[in-house]
Image (cartoon, rainbow, N blue to C red):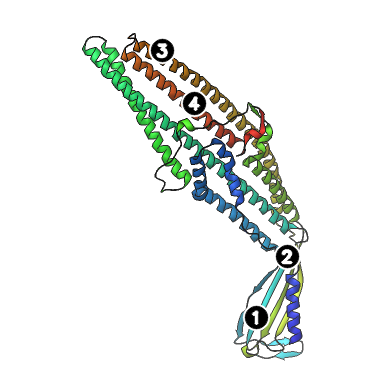
C-alpha cells in the first residue's frame, strides 16, 4: 500500500511539474491612472479650483471607473488564457451498480450472471504539451489586447479632463459675459427711458424711440440666454466631476485667469503619444501574433493524460491494498479535414493584418491633421484676442475723451451712456476671445495625446 501511495504522488508530480508554476501576482498598481490625469500639465493654468475638480473627477467619474473595469476584465482574460497553458487536475467520482449482468467471457473463462457495485474515486490529469507555442501565443495576443484597453482608458482620461477644463473656463467666460450684459441691460433701460422722455417732448422721432426699446429687449434676451447657458454648463460639470451632490461650482474670477503659451509650429513627433496611434500599433502586433496562431493550428497536438485513484466493488474496501489504480499516456491528435475552416481563418487573419496596417497609416494622417487644425485655431484665437484687446483699449481711450467732453458740457448724458455701452461690448468681445484662446490650447493638448505640447515646439 505504501509503494502505491508513492506511485500515486509521483504521477501527480509528473503531470503538475511539466510547466513552471505561475509567478506570484503583483499587487495592483494604479499609479498609471495618475499619469493619465497629468495634473502637472493642468497646473500650468494656475487655477486651484480646476485642479480640485480634476481630482474629484479622478475619484468619482463613472466613465473613468467603467474604463478601468474594462481594463481589469481584459487582464482576467489573460489570466484565464494562461491557466489553459497549465496542467488540469480534476476529480470526478463515480458509482454504479450492475443489477443484472449478461454472461462475460474472458477466453475460456466464463463469468455467469452477476450483480455488483463499483466505486471509482480517480484524480484525472490532462496537459496539452505546447510544443509549437500556440497556446503561449494566444496568451501573448490577449496581453496585447490589455495594452489596447489601457490606451482606450487613457483616451477616456484625456477626453474627460479636456472636456472638464473647457466647460470650467466656459463657465468663467459666462460669468464675465453675464456681468457685462447686466450692465448693458441697466444702461439700455436708462437710455430707453431717456429717449421716451425726448419723444414725449417732441425731441426725437418715434423710430429712434422704438429702436432703443427694441435694443433693450434684445439685451435682456441675450442676458437670459447667457444665464441658461451657465446653468446648463454647470449641470454638465456636475456630470463630468461625477458627484451629484455638487451644488455649487467654485471657480476663479475672470481677471485671474492665466493664458498659457503656444508655439508657432509643432514637430510631427508629437503624435507618437496619442492613444489612438499607440492602440493601432498594439493592434498590428496582436494581429501578427494571431496570424502565427492560425498557422500553428495546422500542426498536430499532443496531450498528456493520466489517472490515479481507487477502484473498489464495495464501499468498505475502497481504500484497500488492492484498489489503487493509476495510468498515464500521450494522445496525439491532428485534424485531417475541417472543410477549409482553418485555411479560411488563416486568410482572414492575414487580411485583418493588412487592414490594421492601413488603419495605422490613416491614424497617422488623421493625427497630423488634428494637431495642425488645433494649432491653427489656437493661433487665430490668439490673434483675435490681441485685436479685441487693442480695440478694447481704444474704446477705453474714446470713453475717457467723451468723459472729459461731458465734464465741460460738450456731451450729453445720453451720448456718454452710449459710449459706455460700446466700451462694455468691447470688453465682452475681449473676454470671449481670451477664453476661446485658452480652450484652443486645451484642444492642442488633446490633439497631441494628453502631453505637454511645448516639448515639441519648433518656434515660440
Tag 2–tag 4 contact (CB < 8 Å): no
Check disc 3 and report the residue beneath it: 401
Q: Residue at x 48, y 32 (%)?
A: 256
* Figure check: 285 above or below 327: above
Q: Is residue 21 left or right of residue 432?
A: right
Q: What's the residue at 64%, 75% (across, down)?
A: 91
For the N terminus, give its image quadrant.
bottom right
Vertical arrangement, residue 221 with respect to residue 47, above or below: above
How many marks on residues?
A: 4
Q: Is residue 195 above or below residue 246?
A: above
Question: Dot 4: what SS?
Answer: helix
Whether residues under marks 1 and 4 lie with C-beta atoms below 8 angstroms apart, the answer is no
Residue that mark 1 sits on: 121
Distance, label 1 to label 4, CA atoms, is 81 Å
439 displayed left or right of 7: left
Residue at the image point whose x is 46% and y is 27% from the top: 431
Which percent across, then down, holds residue 224?
A: 35, 31
Visible residue check, residue 152: no
Residue 81 in picture, x, y percent from top left: 66, 59
Mark 2 vs mark 4, foreground winner is 4
Q: Which mark is residue 433?
A: 4
Labels 1 & 2 near each other (Cβ < 8 A): no
Residue 192 seen:
yes
Q: The residue tagged with tag 1: helix, strand or loop?
A: strand
Q: Earlier in the sequence, mark 1 or mark 4?
A: 1
Q: CA distance from mark 1 to mark 2?
A: 23 Å
Q: Is residue 244 above or below residue 374?
A: below
Position of residue 303 measured from the top left corner of the image (x, y, whole percent): 74, 67
Residue 128 badge: 2
Q: Nearer the viewer, residue 316 or 143?
A: 143
Task: Report helix, strand or loop for mark 2.
Answer: strand
- Say whether disc 3 or disc 1 marks the residue closer to the N-terminus: 1
Amino acid at each position: 500500500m505504501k509503494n502505491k501511495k508513492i506511485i500515486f504522488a509521483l504521477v501527480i508530480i509528473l503531470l503538475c511539474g511539466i510547466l513552471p508554476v505561475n509567478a506570484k501576482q503583483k499587487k495592483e498598481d494604479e499609479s498609471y491612472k495618475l499619469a493619465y490625469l497629468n495634473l502637472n500639465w493642468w497646473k500650468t493654468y494656475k487655477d486651484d479650483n480646476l485642479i480640485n475638480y480634476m481630482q474629484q473627477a479622478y475619484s468619482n467619474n463613472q466613465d473613468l471607473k467603467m474604463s478601468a473595469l474594462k481594463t481589469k476584465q481584459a487582464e482576467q482574460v489573460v489570466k484565464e488564457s494562461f491557466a489553459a497553458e497549465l496542467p488540469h487536475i480534476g476529480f470526478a467520482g463515480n458509482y454504479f451498480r450492475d443489477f443484472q449482468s449478461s454472461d462475460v467471457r474472458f477466453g475460456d473463462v466464463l463469468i455467469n450472471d452477476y450483480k455488483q457495485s463499483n466505486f471509482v474515486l480517480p484524480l484525472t490529469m490532462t496537459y496539452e504539451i505546447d510544443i509549437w507555442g500556440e497556446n503561449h501565443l494566444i496568451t501573448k495576443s490577449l496581453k496585447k489586447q490589455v495594452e489596447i484597453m489601457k490606451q482606450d482608458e487613457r483616451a477616456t482620461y484625456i477626453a474627460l479632463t479636456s472636456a472638464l477644463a473647457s466647460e470650467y473656463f466656459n463657465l468663467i467666460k459666462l460669468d464675465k459675459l453675464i456681468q457685462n450684459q447686466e450692465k448693458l441691460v441697466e444702461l439700455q433701460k436708462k437710455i430707453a427711458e431717456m429717449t421716451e422722455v425726448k419723444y414725449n417732448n417732441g425731441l426725437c422721432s418715434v423710430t429712434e424711440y422704438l429702436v432703443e426699446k427694441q435694443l433693450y429687449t434684445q439685451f435682456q434676451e441675450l442676458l437670459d440666454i447667457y444665464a441658461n447657458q451657465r446653468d446648463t454648463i454647470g449641470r454638465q460639470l456636475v456630470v463630468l466631476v461625477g458627484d451629484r451632490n455638487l451644488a455649487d461650482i467654485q471657480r476663479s474670477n475672470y481677471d485671474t485667469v492665466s493664458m498659457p503659451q503656444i508655439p508657432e509650429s509643432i514637430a510631427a513627433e508629437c503624435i507618437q503619444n496619442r492613444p489612438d496611434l499607440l492602440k493601432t500599433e498594439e493592434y498590428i502586433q496582436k494581429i501578427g501574433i494571431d496570424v502565427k496562431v492560425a498557422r500553428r493550428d495546422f500542426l498536430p497536438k499532443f496531450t498528456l493524460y493520466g489517472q490515479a485513484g481507487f477502484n473498489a466493488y464495495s464501499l468498505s474496501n475502497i481504500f484497500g491494498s488492492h484498489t489503487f489504480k493509476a495510468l498515464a499516456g500521450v494522445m496525439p491528435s491532428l485534424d485531417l479535414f475541417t472543410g477549409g475552416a482553418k485555411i479560411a481563418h488563416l486568410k482572414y487573419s492575414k487580411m485583418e493584418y493588412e487592414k490594421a496596417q492601413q488603419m495605422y497609416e490613416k491614424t497617422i494622417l488623421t493625427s497630423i491633421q488634428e494637431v495642425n487644425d488645433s494649432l491653427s485655431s489656437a493661433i487665430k484665437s490668439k490673434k483675435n484676442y490681441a485685436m479685441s484687446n487693442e480695440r478694447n483699449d481704444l474704446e477705453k481711450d474714446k470713453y475717457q475723451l467723451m468723459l472729459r467732453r461731458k465734464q465741460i458740457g460738450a456731451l450729453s448724458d445720453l451720448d456718454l451712456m452710449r459710449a459706455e455701452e460700446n466700451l462694455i461690448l468691447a470688453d465682452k468681445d475681449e473676454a470671449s476671445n481670451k477664453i476661446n484662446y485658452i480652450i484652443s490650447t486645451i484642444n492642442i493638448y488633446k490633439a497631441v495625446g494628453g502631453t505637454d505640447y511645448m516639448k515639441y515646439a519648433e518656434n515660440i
